[in-house]
């Protein structure tokens, strides 16, 4: 699931429909795509 962040107010948007990319808080259309941190499985020995 892609996560976007508003370039204006920093609101995180997780549910985005294709062609309807807009911040729900301030209606800004410029969003950054945010990569969610991937938890790596590292086994301690
Ligand atoms: Zn915003």
Image: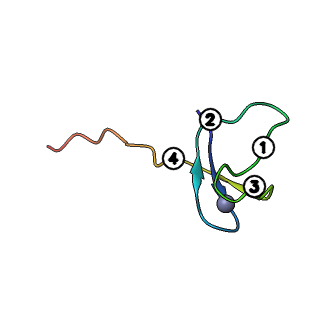
Say whether disc 4 or disc 3 marks the residue closer to the N-terminus: 3
Say whether disc 2 or disc 1 marks the residue closer to the N-terminus: 2
What element does badge 4 sit on?
loop
- Nearer the camera: disc 4 or disc 2: 2
Say whether disc 3 or disc 1 marks the residue closer to the N-terminus: 1
What element does badge 2 sit on?
loop
Crowding at mark 3 (Cα within 10 Å: few <14, some 14-19, many 20+)? few
Q: Which mark is residue 36?
A: 4
Alpha carbons under labels 2 and 1: distance apart:
9 Å
Task: Where is residue 8? Give x, y as percent.
Answer: 69, 68
Depth check, front residue: 33 or 41: 33
Alpha carbons under labels 3 and 2: distance apart:
14 Å
Q: Which residue is mark 3?
A: 27
What element does badge 1 sit on?
loop
Alpha carbons under labels 4 and 2: distance apart:
14 Å
- Nearer the camera: disc 3 or disc 1: 3
Depth check, front residue: 43 or 2: 2
Q: Which mark is residue 21?
A: 1
Label 3 CB-ligand 1 distance < 8 A: yes
Alpha carbons under labels 4 and 3: distance apart:
23 Å
Crowding at mark 1 (Cα within 10 Å: few <14, some 14-19, many 20+)? some
Q: Which mark is residue 15?
A: 2
Image-based side of 33 in relation to 12, left or right: right
Residue drawn at (28%, 42%) of the image: 42
Depth check, front residue: 5 or 33: 5
Residue drawn at (58%, 58%) of the image: 11
Taking the view exactly as shown, the residue that stands out farthest to the left is 45
Task: Where is residue 44? Give x, y as percent.
Answer: 17, 44
Task: Where is residue 14? Give x, y as percent.
Answer: 58, 40
Residue drawn at (73%, 56%) of the image: 31
């Amino acid at each position: 699931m892609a996560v976007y962040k508003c370039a204006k107010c920093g609101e995180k948007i997780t549910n985005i429909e294709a062609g309807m990319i807009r911040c729900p808080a301030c209606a800004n259309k410029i969003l950054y795509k945010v990569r969610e941190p991937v938890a790596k499985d590292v086994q301690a020995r």
